[in-house]
Image (cartoon, rainbow, N blue to C red):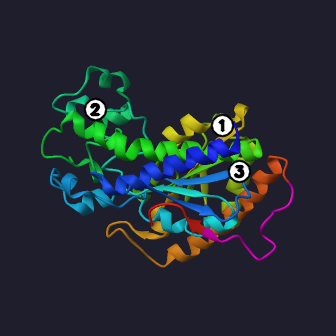
Amino acid sequence: MGLEFLASQLKESVESGVRARNGRFGPALAIEEPVSIVSPVVFASPHSGRLYPDSFMETCAVDRMALRRVEDAYVDRLLSDVPRSGAPVIRGLLGRTFIDLNRAESEMDRDMFSNAPAHWTGNRSPRVAAGLGCIPRTAHRGVRIYRGRLAAEEATARLDDVYRPYHQALDALLRRAQAMFGKTWLVDCHSMPSESQQAGGGADIVLGDRYGASCDGDFVDFVEALFRERGYSTNRNTPYAGGFATLKHGQPGRGRNALQIEIKRSLYLDEYEVEPHDGIVRLRRHLSEIAEELCDFTRAAAGVSGRPGFGDGGVQAKKKAAP
């Protein structure tokens, strides 16, 4: 598959997301591209979106704050310097209670809909049963989101206008990276509520590689060491082993690696008010440093030496989609 074809496909996928600005729900995604791509790493933040369409809010039985408290709030800001390392960042722009980009699109709770098709019973996962399917039923602390049932056509519209454009663009970014370097690494970035850390021993960072199935072990070891060098406590796969993105894209035997990173929200966020505190500055700087180290590591792992484009003091980022 040629680079020109991949570039064309990426452009079409991104434009699909941008066109959604003029559709029913507003912008679907944004991609921050480096001026020069010097790494096979792609960073993603599917859950930091904070846009909520008016038509959605009119159906809700809860206020906006109950919806916002389940966002991976401001992870996109934590990653805002990452493109300077030479790797792209893709992020979803709509709130995860509107549609969850880290679920399979088949993870639907048919009981939420007045006219659900029969095939939606085929993926009745524990997440769906808990109200956390591709279109969630519950928000913060399990409160019910909707006043009544939705039409199945509403789910179809969200999949067409938001979910699929995001995943088409992510797929294109990963295929481009693998075409350029032979291998690729997806770093899927999330934040986790501090209260959930009782099961994880209170770790600051949880690395999810699906118990070694989705990512090369040397890369996971390296990421963990980088966080520990900066004073963060870490855990692996408990309580988060990885979601849909790591399952779909993590195929190390085919040169496709995927690692989920969960960051404890209290490190940078007032979790009740959903507002960043001073810790965001330190954490953002550390993530920028870690991104540069990961770009170097993956270039070496892909058999590429040196860091082209860095002789002038750094690669500057440019925006490729909705701001």
Question: Is 315 part of what is drawn in magenta?
Answer: yes
Which disc number belongs to residue 109? 2
SS under mark 2? loop
Residue 194 drawn at (x, y percent): 43, 59
Q: Can I make out residue 26 in this image?
A: no
- Report the side of 316 relative to 17 (left or right): right
Residue drawn 67% across and 45% down? 4
Residue drawn 85% across and 47% down? 303
Disc 1 crowd, CA 10 A, few/some/many (<14, 14-19, 20+): some
**CA–CA distance in space, label 3 to label 1:** 20 Å
Disc 2 crowd, CA 10 A, few/some/many (<14, 14-19, 20+): many
Q: Amino acid at mark 3?
A: Pro
SS under mark 1? loop
**CA–CA distance in space, label 1 to label 2:** 30 Å
Q: Which residue is mark 3?
A: 40
In the image, farthest residue toward the left: 148
**CA–CA distance in space, label 2 to label 3:** 36 Å
Residue drawn 57% across and 58% down? 89
Q: Quadrant of residue 36?
A: bottom right
Q: Nearer the viewer, mark 1 or mark 2?
A: 2
Question: Is tag 1's residue or tag 2's residue first in the polypeptide sequence?
Answer: 2
Which disc number belongs to residue 212? 1
Give the residues in magenta. Answer: 305-317
- Report the side of 34 relative to 167 (left or right): right
Residue 41 drawn at (x, y percent): 67, 52
Indicate the quadrant containing the N terminus: top left, top right, bottom left or bottom right: top right
SS under mark 3? loop
Q: Amino acid at mark 1?
A: Gly
Q: Nearer the viewer, residue 133 or 7?
A: 7
Question: Is 20 part of what is drawn in magenta?
Answer: no
Tell me whether the residue at label 2 lies in contact with that at label 3, contact meaning CB atoms closer than 8 angstroms: no
